[in-house]
Image: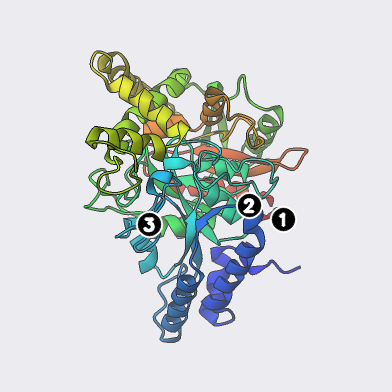
Amino acid sequence: MSVPLHFQTIAELAPQLASGRLSSIELTQAVIARTKAVEARVRAFNSYDETDAIDQAAASDARRAAGQSRGPLDGIPLGLKDVIAVDGQPLTASSKMLANFVSPYDATVTQKLKDAGAVLWGRLNCDEFAMGSSTENSAFGPTHNPWDLARTPGGSSGGSAAALSAGAAIATLGSDTGGSIRQPAALCSLVGLKPTYGLISRYGLIAYASSLDQIGPFARSTEDAAILLGAIAGHDSRDSTSFQTEIPDYRAELKTRRGPWKLGIPREYFGEGLDPEVGAAVEKAIAFYRAQGCEIREVSLPHTRYCLDTYYIIATAEASSNLARFDGIRYGHRSKDGKDVLDVYQKSRAEGFGDEVKRRIILGTYVLSSGYYDAYYLRAQKVRTLIRQDFLNAYREVDALITPTSPIPAFKLGEKSADPLTMYLCDIYTIGVNLAGLPALSLPCGFTKSGLPIGLQLIGQPFREADLLATAHAYEQAHDWHRRTPNL
């Protein structure tokens, strides 16, 4: 049985485009048709422009006809989370605050994708300003998980995950501040990669927490993730946190790097709160690696218990600072009832921001305030150093770590909305990676008895994405979890 175009991978579609058996217009039309068929139920998009997408596809076909193909991404429809700037397209961060804002420039990753010939397709829903774990905190309404429409796709990049899982894009980009790529990838049965901090430029990404945010790909396979990473990685002088390092051919090295690897199992990640079905699936994945000759050893990350507290001090402090610019004066929502400048500030922000964003701004402002900075923010930064050192100590013994991505499968929409702390715990296995600036990848490793996806997380060493992808690829090649698609 042939796989529909909208469920094929970049690696499968690129040769068809190169040989002329398929045109970019045909592929883009198939993705548009699929989007229209499922969007009313999934609600992954904030906006899309069919005419613009077809024009991009036509330009790709013309390049290829002239012998000027730009590589495997040329003509491939890709979706972008609505916090990544695309010149002339809406940039809302899923917030009323930016409801009518149109970006006047491209993010660096956007320009890189354009240079690679990709067809940029749609603005994808997310938790407002990327703050959340369920894509319910959106001014556009919640996104639904294609595997069970009554459940969340995860967050904050839930639209990016749901669109790809549903076949409404061939691949997508998201951003990951505390697990916002990996957790939705796990809940939607996708590959999701959070690269090393500094590997990919953040220029043109609406900032949530600048020392934690990182853009990364969602893909159907590790090979597709490698293709996308190769296209968007690299130093950018416009981002002061961008790191100068050699960018390998991730796709080529994916197939040449072989194990066996030394893999660490953090004992702190397999305790209370882990769903039994999730734990069993991850244990089977560990057994697979052991059977392949990998050395599996238990390691300890003793400061894991402080990760959640540390994250929500640092992230909210940076959010408070970054979101101060949205004041209703220069751009964004402005209250019509303001009596003076201060009143405009207060009412515009009160009307423009949702509850979760307000919660984080208030908490962040508090921990940065006079008399509390040393007690909270400064202390959290010191603990952050200890958390990173835990990982580096582990890497003296092992090549990578293997853990669950999410402690639970996809939960029902509205189930955790009234209890923010319970929602925050959904990221317990992912936030340490962001605090330490490390690369990590989630890939499908099974399903629950009720048919919900389960994700496996691999945590790598700084700037060792090639090894991380190769380790994941070894598992993927022996299993077909990533080949399964939801029945919408």
What is the number of the mark on residue 232?
3
Residue depicted at 63% across the width and 52% down the height: 42
Above-or-below relation of 393 to 14: above
- Labels 3, 1: front one: 1
Q: As shown in the figure, which amino acid type bears the numbered disc 1?
A: Leu
Counting residues from the start of the chain, the first of labels 2 and 1 encountered is 2
Residue topped by disc 1: 488
Label 1, residues with CA under 10 Å away: few <14, some 14-19, many ≥20: few
Q: Is residue 454 left or right of residue 228?
A: right
CA distance for labels 3 and 1:
31 Å
Q: Quadrant of the N terminus?
A: bottom right
Report the disc number at residue 42. Answer: 2
Q: CA distance from mark 2 to mark 1?
A: 9 Å
Is residue 381 at all visible to an observer of this figure? no
Give the image quarter of residue 220: bottom right
Left or right of 324? Residue 208 is right
Side (left or right) of 187 relative to 461? right
Q: Nearer the viewer, mark 2 or mark 1?
A: 2
Q: Residue furthest bottom?
A: 66
Check if mark 2's residue and mark 1's residue have beta carbons within 8 Å: yes
Which of the marked residues, 3 or 2, is nearer the chain's N terminus?
Answer: 2
> Which amino acid type is shown beneath numbered disc 3?
Ile
Residue 484's spot in the image, x, y percent? 70, 53
Label 3 environment density (alpha carbons within 10 Å; few <14, some 14–19, many ≥20)? many
Secondary structure beneath dot 2 equals helix
Q: What numbered label is drawn on residue 290? A: none
In this view of the protein, which residue sits in the foreground, 83 or 216? 83
